[in-house]
Structures are given as structure tokens and as C-alpha cells.
Image: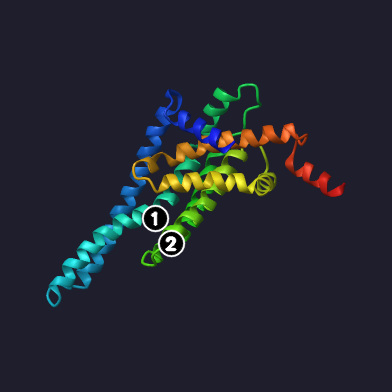
Amino acid sequence: MLIQTVIAAARDVFSPALRRILWKSIGLTIALLALVWVVLTRLLDTFLSTHDLSASYPILDSFAFFLAGFGLFLGLFYLLPAVSAIVAGYFLDDVAEIVERKHYPADLPGQALPFGKAILYGLRFGALSLAVNLVALLLLFVPGINIGVFFIANAYLLSREYFELAAGRFWSPEEVKLLRYEHRGTVLAAGAVLAGLVLVPILNLVTPIFGAAMMVHLHKGLMARRLADGRAGSPLRVEVGRRAS
């Protein structure tokens, strides 16, 4: 199922129907990263200007500027998953509506999250992702661990956020949590795909739209599997009935 889901999402991302949203998503992602770059640069300039190293340690001063530039670039790389979470919260319903209408016209359409709730949801996951990736950044100089921590942490976080956003169009938060736990292996594997995409320069800019489309397809596939297994209806009611039997 996962391979078919990835292929379907890849086709959708560059389709004419989603192309406009894709460019908007890339533009917003770059704008947010540029804003972070400006803020970090100003803070760094303020620090270096109040701690003048050039007079006593000219070599150290030059090294500090070089390290600062490289460090800012690397920091933005670790911030990208958090930015992706915010952008995904903004565009997911638009992407989901197009994917559902194109591929699942016979199904009842999902209900869009209120705009404020979607943004707050994205900001919440963005903050969580930021905290986790800052820890991964602190492990930068621990060979063999830093990339592993970055990948595993973001596979979990991205799988959780994108799946909850996509499934939340149809189910309550409690039902979505139950679905994610029931299919945790498949959902986490989808998150691993997103975490791998984040590691690829340039292509990582399409993560919000690709992730949204992929999780819509994944949720639909899981629902079709549940229907085939005779577990149609509310996941919460099915689980309560199973425990009672």
C-alpha cells in the first residue's frame, strides 16, 4: 500500500490541479526560512559586535564569522521540518479537497478544519518539531548519532502531524489517535518517507504538499482495508465493541 501511496502522491504534487498550491507552498516555506535567517543573522551580528574578537584574536574572529555562516545554514536545515509543519497546516485542506475530489469522487468529502484551528495545529507541531530538532542539532558533533536522531524523530513527528491533519477531516481527535495507533507501523513508514525527503536539498521544499497528498491517499487506503475487514464505521465504536466482545 505504501509504495502505491507514494507514487500517487508524487503524481499529484506536480499535477496541474495542485501546481498553483505547490508554488504557494514553496514561496511560503522560503519566506519563513528567510525570515528566520534574518532574525538569526541580526542576533549573531549583535553578539559579535558586543564581543569584539578582532583586536585580540583576529584568527578567531575570522573563524567565528565562517562558522556563523555555516552554522546558520545548517540551523535552517534542522528548522525545515518545523517550518514544513506550519506550512502543511495552512495548505492541507486545499490539497485534501483536490485529491479527494479527483481520486475518490464517490466518497463523502472530508470536513475542512477551521482556519484558526488548522494554523494553531501546525504551530503546535512546529514548536514540538523545533524542540526535537534543536536537540538533534546539539548532537551534531556526535558522529553516527545526529543524522539518526534527526531521521527517527522527524519520521515520528511528521507521520503523526500529517496523518492527524488528513484523518481529522473525517474523524474526531480520539478516533484519529486510535486509527494512528492501530496502523502505527504503516503511518510511521510513511513518516520515514517524509523524513527522507526532508534530507534532500531542493526536493525538501515540496514536503508540505507531498506529505498532505500522501497522507490523504494513505488514510483512504486504510479505510478501504478496514471496510474489507468488516470494520466500517467509527473507529472508536469498533474498538469499544471489540473490547466488549
Q: Which residue was labeled with disc 1? A: 78
Q: Is residue 47 left or right of residue 88?
A: left
User: Residue 109: x percent and y percent?
Assistant: 62, 28
Can you identify the residue that label 2 sits on? 136
What amino acid type is highlighted by mark number 2? Ala
The x and y percentages for residue 114 are: 57, 39
Secondary structure type for disc 1: helix
Q: Quadrant of residue 140?
A: bottom left
Q: Nearer the viewer, residue 19 or 194?
A: 194
Say which quadrant the N terminus sits in.
Answer: top right
- Percent from the top left, x then y, of residue 183? 65, 45
- Identify the residue at image location x=65%, y=21%: 106
Whether 78 is drawn above or below 239: the answer is below
Please give the label number shown on residue 159: none
Amino acid tagged 1: Tyr
Residue 203 lies in what quarter of the image? top left
Nearest the camera: 223 or 99? 223
Q: Are marks 1 and 2 in contact (CB under 8 Å)?
A: yes
How many numbered marks appear?
2
Q: Residue 217 lies in what quarter of the image?
A: top right
Q: Marks 1 and 2, how far apart in space?
A: 8 Å
Q: Viewer-proximal residue, 90 or 138? A: 138
